[in-house]
Amino acid sequence: MTTIISNSKLTASIKHAGAELFSLKNNDNKEFIWEGNPDFWGKHSPVLFPIVGTLKNNTYTVNDISYHLPRHGFARDIEFNLVSKTDESAIFSIQSNAESLKVYPFEFELQIIYTLIDSQLDIQYKVINKDDSKMPFSIGAHPAIALPGNFENYALEFEKQESLKYSLLENDLISNKTKQLETKENQIELNYQLFENDALIFKSLESNSLTILENNKPYIKVDFADFPSLGIWTKENAPFICIEPWFGYSDTPENTGNLFEKEGIVTLDANQTFNSKFSIEIL
């Protein structure tokens, strides 16, 4: 099933499977979300919950009991319920159940709220702890922005002057090794060599947004002010770039396995609600 929302400038299409955005078009029918060709990557904009990235041995512990979760968690593989819809917005939800409790022993509700405002799509995450104890989780976005034409015609312009130090992945875990990107006027020119060691992972940034430039002209702006961390990723020769706002990231090799002690984890008090949002603006 799919749900479509639209306003005078944009139309967004969302699959109920994973509540995944798979299309964002303007009035000229130009598509801004990656088509999901499995020859490169078969997804469009999956939701990462209740972990972001990879756990060491795909395993974590809570109260000395071991649980297993695949990379990026399970929310992206679950059919969401459509809670409500207007012309310009839609709310999707999943709740813990007998199956989720086997791999993530917490009672929760996850809502994803899509709202079109002028030339911008807001994507809000609402995590509700329905347990009587603290709940650890990570949540993140993984939107793939379509980049038609020559990949090297595009650049990323950060909102602020940055020391762009990023963490390197080793065996899908965050290593202690870092590299620094050179910028020119807060910009990085895109090329596939940047991603030869997989994603660029920034544990923290000064910027609250970045703008994708096409031939030096603003193309799309992604605002991630609510999120402390950011991943940037593509695959060799793929015509897209993923701009990924995150709470949390992969385990480090030193991780104890205790989910409450995981670097970057969010701990939500009993019966409380967590809110965050990011936006994709067509320029």
Image: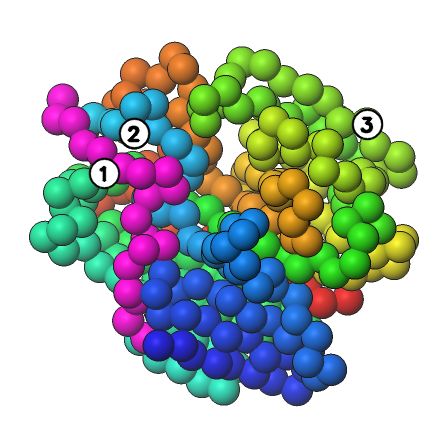
Where is residue 15 drawn, in percent x and y?
Answer: 41, 70
Q: Are marks 2 and 3 in contact (CB under 8 Å)?
A: no
Instruction: Locate residue 9 relative to residue 68 in the image: left or right.
Output: right
Camera-nearest residue between 166 and 265: 166
Q: Which residue is mark 3?
A: 182
Residue name at image x 37 percent, y 51 percent: 274
Image quadrant in which the C terminus is located: bottom right
| Residue drawn at the location 34% of the way across and 23% of the way down | 56
Is any part of residue 238 visible from this angle?
A: yes
Q: Amino acid at mark 1?
A: Lys
Q: Residues within 10 Å of mark 3 (few under 14, many from 20)?
A: some
**Relative height, residue 33 to residue 264 (above, below):** below
Q: Position of residue 268 (x, y in %)?
A: 31, 42
Mark 2 residue element: helix
Which mark lies nearer to you, 3 or 1?
Answer: 3
The residue pinned by badge 1 equals 134
Q: Secondary structure at mark 3?
A: loop
The answer to whether any part of residue 226 appears in the image is: no
Q: Residue at x 58, y 39 (%)?
A: 231
- Which span is picked out in magenta? 62-82
- Residue 58 is marked as 2
- Residue type pointed to by label 3: Glu
Circle 1 Cα neighbour tier, 10 Å, few/some/many (<14 / 14–19 / ≥20): some
Mark 2 belongs to which amino acid?
Answer: Asn
Colour mapping used in the image: rainbow
In front here: 44 or 158? Answer: 44
